[in-house]
Amino acid sequence: MVFRHNNGRDAHVQAQRDGGAKVAVVEPGRILTAPHDPTFPLTPDGAIVTRKHGEQIFDISCHALRGTRLDEAAERKKNGFGELERRRTAKAQLDTLRARLEEPFHIPGHEAALRRQISTAENTFHNSFHTGYAGASAVRGSGFHAVALNEHFGYGSDAFDFLEAVLHEGDKLRIDEPGERFRHDDQTWACRSHREFTTQRAAVAMARGAYAGVVEADKNAAKARASLPAEELLRPAARVSWRPWARGRNGSSARPSSSSASHSASPTARPPASPPASPPAGPSRQALGFINCPALRTGAIMAN
């Protein structure tokens, strides 16, 4: 998720630079101040300054949501959520777990379990409270847009308002109307306008980020598997089929007799001859499946 988010953020900023924005920066620091607490961290994903609409601040979020639920996620970014007291409590619990991580470990597996607890506590802390970006942006005199995207690179309602505010003014000209239009060396027939150029670039960048995230998860899983004791690696995999008679060795779908079923379920049944083979090195089949993503095959713009 982090790779996909960061790639989409960088692609939107770079597309506005290519479109002639006066200023387009990633994560501008200390431009917003929370109304309730000046020390509360408020770092949006980007800020873009155009000649017509001035400064527009935006923050991107990726979700597995559709329609109105995507808009609800955008409202949380704009107006905030949660309670400040819950954040303080979650921060105290997180600090306690991190302090325990500095202590020496004598029980095998205890460190891994504690790191999982810390990961859960971090999610609780980040989802406990946020003041929102809209109020702080209004105090600064800037517009704010919550760019909510789903896994198929679909935009929420507020994201379309963001595009209208930052895109090249030539997109609003009629076909026969004279005026300056968007031009770029990487344009193709599929992205003649700045809007198409921006959305296509962001979609390709997020697809590449999703692939990078799966590859990184595979590497972490391989490291975790390498650290397991030998008895864990040699343990046979659990049977997942709830109808083992669905298809026999000869391809028949007949249910076995009670005697054969009881024999197969006997505790003295012969164990597997050898442990399951380790997966080959490199990206998994799930990771390689992202290569077939249409966004990776569409157009010539590959965001780096």
Image (cartoon, rainbow, N blue to C red):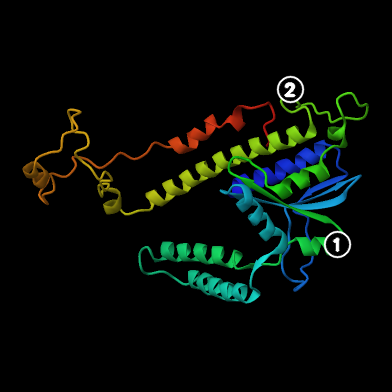
Label 1: how many residues lie within 10 Å, few (<14), some (14-19) or many (20+)?
few
Residue 200 is marked as none
Q: Which residue is mark 2?
A: 189
Q: Is residue 101 visible?
A: yes
- The x and y percentages for residue 174 are 87, 28
- Earlier in the chain: of badge 2 and badge 1, it is 1
Name the residue nearer the viewer: 218 or 74.
74
> Which amino acid is tagged 1?
Arg
The reply, left or right, for residue 42 in relation to residue 235 is right
At a point 9% along the width and 47% down the height, the residue shown is 262
> Which element is circle 2 on?
loop
Placement of 220 over or under 123, stated as above or below: above
At a point 78% along the width and 58% down the height, the residue shown is 29
> Which element is circle 1 on?
helix
Name the residue nearer the viewer: 186 or 241.
241
Q: Residue 12 sits in which quadrant?
A: top right
At a point 51% along the width and 41% down the height, the residue shown is 215
Q: Which residue is mark 1?
A: 140
The reply, left or right, for residue 97 in relation to residue 162 is left
Q: Is residue 284 visible?
A: no
- Residue that protrudes farthest toward the right in the picture: 178
Q: How many marks?
A: 2
- The x and y percentages for residue 179 are 93, 29
Of the 4 image quadrants, the one containing the C terminus is top right
Q: Residue 109 sits in which quadrant?
A: bottom left
Label 2: how many residues lie within 10 Å, few (<14), some (14-19) or many (20+)?
few
- Residue that protrudes farthest toward the front in the picture: 68
- The x and y percentages for residue 114 are 45, 66
> Which amino acid is tagged 2?
Trp
- The x and y percentages for residue 223 are 43, 49
Using the numbered discs, state the Cα–Cα distance from disc 2 to disc 1 in whole angstroms. 40 Å
- Residue that protrudes farthest toward the left in the picture: 259
